Amino acid sequence: MKAWRFYGFGDLRLDEVPVPELRPRHVLVEPLCVQPSVTEAQLAFGIPTLAYDRVKRRLETEAPIQLFGHEFCARIIETGPGVSRFQVGDRVAARAKLPCEKCSLCLSERSSLCRKGPVIGFDQPGCFSEVASLPEIALVKVDDCISDSEAACLQSLSDSIAAVETAAIQMGDSVVIFGQGSMGLECLQIARISGAGLVITVDVREESCRISKELGADHALNARTCDVLAVIRDLTDGNGADVVFECAGGSPKQGLAGTQTLRQAIDAARSGGKVIGVSWFGGPLELNVDLLRERSLRYLFPDISTQAHLEHTVRLVASGRVHLNSTITHMLDGLESVPQAFEITANKGKFQAINPAQVVIQRDTDHPPGRIA
């Protein structure tokens, strides 16, 4: 079969490799639609972020290797021994971080807390290939009314659900979200249906602000044209927001906000409020802890998404409570387009992309992916 393999950072090649063997409690799938996550797009070009050291070690010791591709929709073509929840023909999506099933947490039915298991796309191949092998424990069945394109976004959406759950929003809480890329727009919608009152979003791109308003923001602030903190204080009676999500930070090399939006998020929260750190920064940063202590701020990080989160994403999208189509701006045709998808996703501002670029690998006439660009 054909599969993309990395020989080093920035060196991605389409190779002929053996079809993976079918193992117990695994399924073989044909990917239908797959997208590189923003984190994967940074790592592909050697930009430090989450898992950089792990990927670097693997490239130095194991290359060429299949990497990335954990955000996908795929169809099962064969089931291995012990598989009980799926059958051939089912469309599936997956969560990326899996329990090890061996540690004391897993053995005491607290596997959702386990951090020792493999990560799809990082420790084992994802779906940038014609066929992939996936563990049953990672998968959820995709509802028939969800398109392949929407289903490829479900993993990211499950992480956004975990972020909003961590925030523990109270009915009527004021919420600010810095960054209106895919996860920022997801957090917006989930916060809305989780009881948020006033919702204010912030971005530097007019198209992101426009989509944010369409998806339910009360105020979508363009940071290039207004004093964001002054407007937030004015809209919250001078107090600041109850909950602030920081979804914009990261490497400026790829158009992200560096650490600036984290400092703004802290300033935008009311005393006693919460800041939810969604972004990855790729290295240490300087933080005035005394300021957080003085203002009784809580700087929280999302829990990893679980099987329950992923199953909930299916219900939210199938019921129309969360909308994904308007965020999907770039769709490419064929496995050969994967490098272009990485390039677009790594430079979303340059290409005016919102969601990561998607690649349609197999045609699914029953669940059409949408527009092809």
Image (cartoon, rainbow, N blue to C red):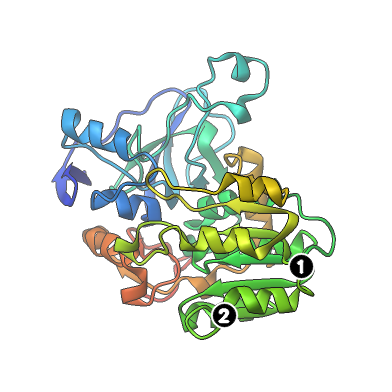
The three-letter amino acid code for the residue at tag 1 is Asn
The percent coordinates of residue 8 (x first, y second) are 16, 43
Give the spatial CA distance, label 1 vs label 2.
16 Å
| Contact, mark 1 vs mark 2 (Cβ under 8 Å) | no
Left or right? Give the position of 116 relative to 348: right
Within 10 angstroms of label 2, few (less than 14), some, or many (20 or more) residues?
Answer: few
Q: Is residue 150 visible?
A: no
**Residue at numbered disc 2:** 227
Which residue is disc 1 drawn over? 239
Residue closer to the observer: 102 or 277:
277
Q: Residue at x 64, y 53 (%)?
A: 275
Residue 261: image location, x then y, percent: 51, 63
- Quarter holding the C terminus is bottom left
Q: How far from the left and from the top, in percent, is residue 248? A: 48, 62
84 or 210, which is in the foreground? 210
| Vertical side of 149 occupied by 202: above or below | below
Say few, some or many: other residues with alpha carbon within 10 Å of mark 1 (under 14 / 14 to 19 / 20 or more).
some
Q: Based on the displayed image, in which of its 4 quarters is residue 103 positioned?
A: top right
- Please, is residue 43 above or below residue 261 in the view? above
Residue 231, image x and y in percent?
65, 79
Q: Name the side, left or right, on which 156 lies relative to 214.
A: left
- Please give left or right for residue 100 compared with residue 62 in the image: right
